[in-house]
Structures are given as structure tokens and as C-alpha cells.
Image: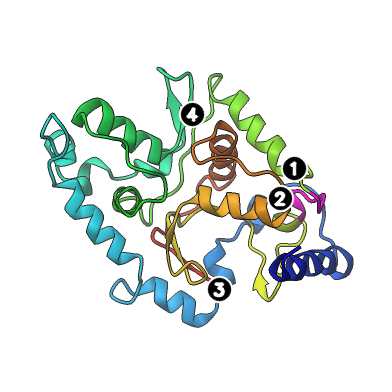
Amino acid sequence: MTARAARLFLALSAARLFVEPAAAGEVPLSERRSGYEFMSRETRAMQDDDTGNPGTLWVLDGEALWKRKAGASDRACSDCHGDARESMKAVAARYPAFDPALRRPVNLEQRINACRVGRQKAPALAYESRDLLALTAYVTRQSRGLPINITIDARTRPFLEAGREAFFRRQGQLNLACAQCHDDHWSGKLAGSPITQAHPTGYPLYRLEWQGLGSLERRLRGCLTGLRAESYPYGAPELVDLELYLMWRANGMRMETPAVRP
């Protein structure tokens, strides 16, 4: 066990033993809070100021990529979708969304790559690459301030339930579930950092720990590693299902991309 893993194990053990437990189950609607509300004054100020928010650099790169022609089709995103400020407004607030061809939900990164491959005839962008994060941040930025609006129907309900099951399932050598931190102990701290309610209102977001922008899947994979559980590859159905559940339970909350977190 590395020193970092040992510190995490001790911190998690302390959280389990000494944090006063809250009622088990999902956070009541009346008590839902964005992770922004748990941040320090300095971190909130950094997020609020577009000129000081480091995530703005990725948004600007995404705007340039939106207008840049690519692939054998020699097309830009703007050639099909026009001005993103209009065409992409509220789009990210609806993802993950069902893809009829794949017969399952896809997240926004997967939708962007599907357009690149299918429309632009260009290679898919690698997960967590600067270009994919930039395009995702730019598209999602057009939904900032708008409510998350995940619609569940007969097609998506099985995937929502799979994500819900994963959130409440104990995993890894620490034998902990996501819900034990984010539902039961969201008012506490873990290794000095606030425990939030896991509402993904600001992704892709800038983490001071990463010194860069990252996706929700990167955060989920990091949590699984912290639990000493086997992670999933980027784009895995298990991660998309969990992302669907997290976005669904944040329905009605305002989008913040690009958020800033510790």
C-alpha cells in the first residue's frame, strides 16, 4: 500500500467511525446542494470570474475547434450546427441521452466522437485529451445557468437502475459505496476536503489537484481507485450508467461548467 493509499484508508476509516451518520438513502430534494456551496470563498471566486477561471482556457480552445474543419469531409462542427450559443443551448443538460443505434445511453463525449467519426470522417478524439475536453467544455458552457433535464422513459430506465445500483453497492477492499460518503456523510470532510453530494453540475471541471480540466468519468475512476476497487475503462457502459443516475438525481439543478474544485 502506498503512503497516499494508506492516508486515504485511514481517512475513510475515520469517516466511517467518527462522522455522525445521517439518514440513509438519497439526499432529499429540499436538501440538495451543488458542490459549489461546499467550496471555500477563494475557490468560488475563481469559478465565478471567467477571466480567473482556468477552465475558461479549455472553453476558448473548444470554440476554436468548433469552427475548425476536420476529417475527410472537411467539415467543422459549425457547418452543421451553426452558432453553438444557439444550437447547443441546453443540450448538455440532457446528457447522457439514449442512442437508438447503440440501444443505450451515451454521454456527451461519446456523442461528440460519434459526430466526428460519422459526419466529419475524422478519427475519434481520445478520452481526456485536451481537444475532447475542450469541445465538451465549450458545448456544455452553452448550458451554464440552465437546469439539468434528464428524461427517463422505458428505454433508459434499465440503465438508470443499473447506475443507481452501482451508487449504492459496496465496492473494493474498503467495502464502501458511493452513497455512504455522498448521501450519508455529505456534511463532513475526507482528508481535509469537503464531502459533497456528488451532483455533477460542473463537468468538465478544473480541479486544483489535477492542475487541469477533467471529465466526470475521470472523477468516477478516481473514486473507484480510492476504494481500492477495479475501475472501468473510459466510455464503459458501467460509467455511463452511473453518470446517467448522477445527472438524473441532479435534475433541476443549474449547470455550472466549467466549475472549479479542490
The stretch drawn in magenta includes residue 176: yes
Look at discs 4 and 3 and give the one toward the viewer. Answer: 4
Residue extending farthest to the bottom is 42
N-terminal-most mark, 4 or 3:
3
Q: Distance between the residues labelled 4 and 3?
A: 31 Å
The amino acid sitting under disc 1 is Phe
Residue 206 screen position, x and y as percent: 43, 65
Q: Residue at x 72, y 66 (%)?
A: 2
Q: Name the residue under label 4.
A: 105
**On-image quarter of the N terminus:** bottom right
Q: Mark 2 points at which residue?
A: 178
N-terminal-most mark, 2 or 4:
4
- Dot 4 and dot 3 residues touching (CB under 8 Å): no
- Residue extent of the magenta highlight: 173-180
**On-image quarter of the C terminus:** bottom right
- For this view, does 163 lie left or right of residue 34? right
Viewer can see residue 232: yes
Numbered badge on residue 39: 3
Mark 4 neighbour class, 10 Å CA radius: few under 14, some 14 to 19, many 20 or more: many
The stretch drawn in magenta includes residue 161: no
Q: In which quarter of the image is residue 30?
A: bottom right
Choose between 131 and 187: the one closer to the eye: 131
- Dot 1 and dot 2 residues touching (CB under 8 Å): yes
Q: Quadrant of residue 259?
A: bottom left
N-terminal-most mark, 1 or 2:
1
Q: Name the residue under label 1.
A: 168
The amino acid sitting under disc 3 is Met
